[in-house]
Image (spheres, rainbow, N blue to C red):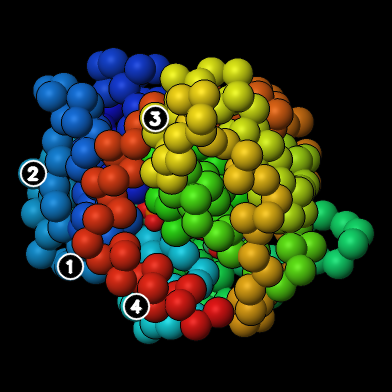
Amino acid sequence: MTYLITGGAGFIGSNFVKHMLSKYPEAKLIILDALTYAGNLGTLTEELKNPQITFIKGDICDRQVTEQLFSEHTIDYVVNFAAESHVDRSIENPQLFLQVNVLGTQNLLDTAKKYWTEGKDDNNYPVWRKGVKFLQVSTDEVYGSLGDEGYFTETTTLSPRSPYSAAKAGGDLIVQAYGETYKMPVNITRCSNNYGPYHFPEKLIPLIIKNILAGQQLPVYGNGSNVRDWLYVGDHCKAIDTVLHNGRIDEVYNIGGHNEKKNIDIVKLVIKTIHDIMENEPEYRKVLKKQEVLADGTTDISWINDNLISFVKDRQGHDQRYAIDPTKISSELGWLPETFFDKGIVKTIYWYLNNQEWVEEVTSGDYMKYYEQMYGNR
Ligand code: NAD
Ligand code: DAU
């Protein structure tokens, strides 16, 4: 089987590539990624040595690129991760989000339609090559924001509130339109907040880890009471694999692990976990950028405490709470999350402590400008 994985050099896409390579060593994986600030080939150094992988640097909006790719490879599945993914950036530049998340998705759909269909049936519908499928990786944010009660199900009305989520909802709708109008075999998955290795440090958890290690303030928007429903990235990848191979055509599947946390509680937990690691395994203190040597020759860690927290101006239109009801994917396809948050967050923190070179690489250059611009005036 040949899989086209767009956005495969980003956070979830790269974790998915790693998952697929280890689970299906015979599969051919074509990665299409524009390598924006969020895409990093350093994340795939080992994988790119594998002859089963072809990497193409290109834009999902570029018809020439997608045509060439479909004409050169017999693709069976498309898994579309490629997107502009950060809500704060969408508030600064909404048009880019519409361009990539809506028009890029439509370009991929249309190219796939051209190469996956052979003539028309009696009702004028395209005849699709057997076994092909387009899976759109979407988000719980398309459902909008919840109050204290309730969960998003697959039948919850779409009510996106940020330019990012509006663009993702637009992408979902055009996928559904191709499913209805052309009978294209599609699935949409809508997942809650992911965390884990290779998460770009503009997002809450990796940003907090990075700032603690640097002895910098931890910017918490508003009063920190907003709730997100966190899922370990590896569990998300397994869910996508499950839907891709077993999901009923045209269906939407929500993915989440019933793991709601207030932002402020996450931040405090990360502070405490890093402090505990530094206390119990002093060899990790060398990773700290803030080095103050005490009289006994050890590195001071007393400053790793809640005083690092800084409540800053809230995100505009900040969604209060997300919470996924994953009953459908669990009962229909047997998927269940495997990584409990208390274990997953510790695993993630160790990953960052052990992979500071990756963090340095992805946050050099433009990231510093972004950080100054985004947080300098909060
Ligand atoms: P990311 O920003 O880390 O990665 C996005 C990748 O897409 C990058 O490698 C980037 O270079 C690439 N890309 C961007 N524009 C492109 C273009 N025009 N053409 C080709 N490639 C392009 O994002 P992520 O967090 O890995 O999210 C992946 C997908 O999953 C997105 O569609 C996102 O909406 C969705 N999602 C993310 C989360 C989450 O918590 N991170 C949760 C649910 C759904
Ligand atoms: O729910 C799924 C979505 O989760 C995905 O579709 C998005 O691609 C992904 O970026 C993520 O969106 P969020 O906006 O929830 O993630 P972020 O990490 O940006 O923020 C998480 C929460 O933390 C949110 O309530 C805003 C808050 N926050 C974030 C940052 C970056 C802060 O308080 N301070 C910060 O510096």
Secondary structure under the numbered disc 2 in the rendered image:
helix
Q: Which residue is mark 1?
A: 62
Q: Which residue is mark 2?
A: 72
Q: Please state which amino acid type lies under the numbered disc 4.
A: Leu
Residue 361 at what x, y percent from top left? 24, 46
Above or below: residue 105 compared with residue 299: below
Pointers 2 and 1 in contact (C-beta within 8 Å): no
Q: Earlier in the sequence, mark 3 or mark 1?
A: 1
| Viewport quadrant of the C terminus | bottom right
From the image, state whether disc 3 or disc 4 is nearer to you: 3
CA distance separating discs 3 and 1: 45 Å
Count residues near mark 2 (Cα–Cα under 10 Å), then give few for <14, some for 14-19, many for 20+. few
- The verdict on label 1 being within 8 Å of ligand 1 is yes
Q: Earlier in the sequence, mark 4 or mark 2?
A: 2
Count residues near mark 1 (Cα–Cα under 10 Å), then give few for <14, some for 14-19, many for 20+. few
Q: Please state which amino acid type lies under the numbered disc 2.
A: Glu
